[in-house]
Image (spheres, helix red, strand yellow):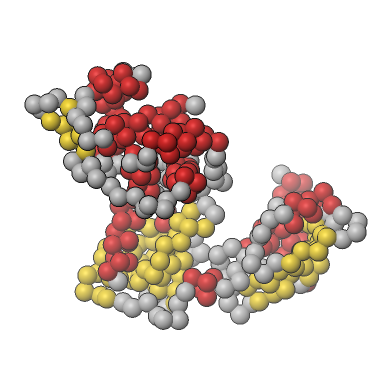
Amino acid sequence: MPATDHILRLLSIIATLQSGRFVNTRELAEECQVSRRTIFRDIERLRASGFKIAFDEQRQGFQFENSHFLLPTDLTTEEVLALLTLCRDMADEKKGLSYLAPAKSAAFKLAGVLPHEMRTFIEDSIELRHIRLDATADLQGTNELFETISDAMHKHQSIKVQYGSFSEQTTISTRLDPYCFFFSRRSWYVIGYSAIHREVRTFHMKRFQEVDVLPKTIYKIPASFSLDSYLGNAWHMIREKDHPFHVVVRFAPMVARNVAEIRWHKTQAIQLLADGSAEFHVDVDGLNEITWWILGYGKQAEVIEPPELREKVLEHAQAIVEQYTTS
């Protein structure tokens, strides 16, 4: 596959440069069986990824400026293969997660200093393992905002933000003390204390419009804060405080085993019944998020309890029927 060939070619260039000898584009082109123009583009890609590749005018060759890396002596081939697979797929610019480009360059650096036998095994095996993510948010153009927030987070400096609030349906301005970044299912979020809301809130990275660091404001993260305590038993990530519910959903035989095979929530319990159906039990803080999950199974799922959830699902179902019968 072209993408795999490109990765292997970059690894080959890294390995050659890591040897310490000066090498020119003609030699690299012959070794990789591509044109010199392709080699020039590959070197520029490696430089853009953080590799310091110097060109010596007298010797007319390339070499790493810093060519010595240390590997843990007990690093196994399987450990390296797992890391490279994660970095290749999770940090892919088009299909992976935003903000993980450094992981990809780190993977190339690691692969470039592997012993020959280990590198050969990796090259033969990496195409046998793939990770494919579901659709993720388009965060293109937010790298600078991410870096600004990240820097403020490390220094515990507050930030002033202009934010397009989905829940309030308007642009809000608030001082935010950013506690941590959090990736969940489809996108990156910032969790922190919002002055205008007077509580810890979740902010979607795509909705930040402006971010300004307030250098004279230093905040402390409360000792009581943790991501687990903040999310509680939310079905996904929106915790409706003071609204705990025990939910029971019966799934028809057509989907019962599929539901039972997946760990949807930390509190779930599933009972497979004699007729092939399944009862799904879970404790959640709030019903809005789990409502959409249940609706996704259509008539294959029936809410047994609580009655509030049955009512929510019924309201949505009736609205869907009305939409299709009156349009």
Q: Position of residue 177 (x, y in %)?
A: 35, 71
Q: In the picture shown, does residue 207 fall above or below 54?
A: below
Q: Position of residue 286 (x, y in %)?
A: 64, 71
Tell me where residue 32 sits by quadrant.
top left
Question: Toward the viewer: 141 or 119?
Answer: 119
Left or right, residue 231 beside residue 32: right
Question: Toward the viewer: 93 or 317?
Answer: 93
Residue plotted at (61% across, 80% down): 242
Instruction: Name the quadrant of the C terminus.
Output: top right
Q: Position of residue 241 (x, y in %)?
A: 58, 77
Residue plotted at (49% across, 32% down): 124
Q: In the picture shown, does residue 96 fall above or below 241?
A: above
Tell me where residue 131 sits by quadrant.
top right
Q: Position of residue 294 (x, y in %)?
A: 72, 58
Residue plotted at (36% across, 44% down): 110
Marker count (numbered): 0
The residue lying furthest to the left in this view is 58
Q: Is residue 117 visible?
A: yes
Q: In the picture shown, does residue 316 fall above or below 46?
A: below
Question: Toward the viewer: 290 or 255?
Answer: 255
Q: Is residue 170 visible?
A: no
Left or right, residue 148 beside residue 79: left
Left or right, residue 199 beside residue 39: right
Residue plotted at (48% across, 54% down): 187
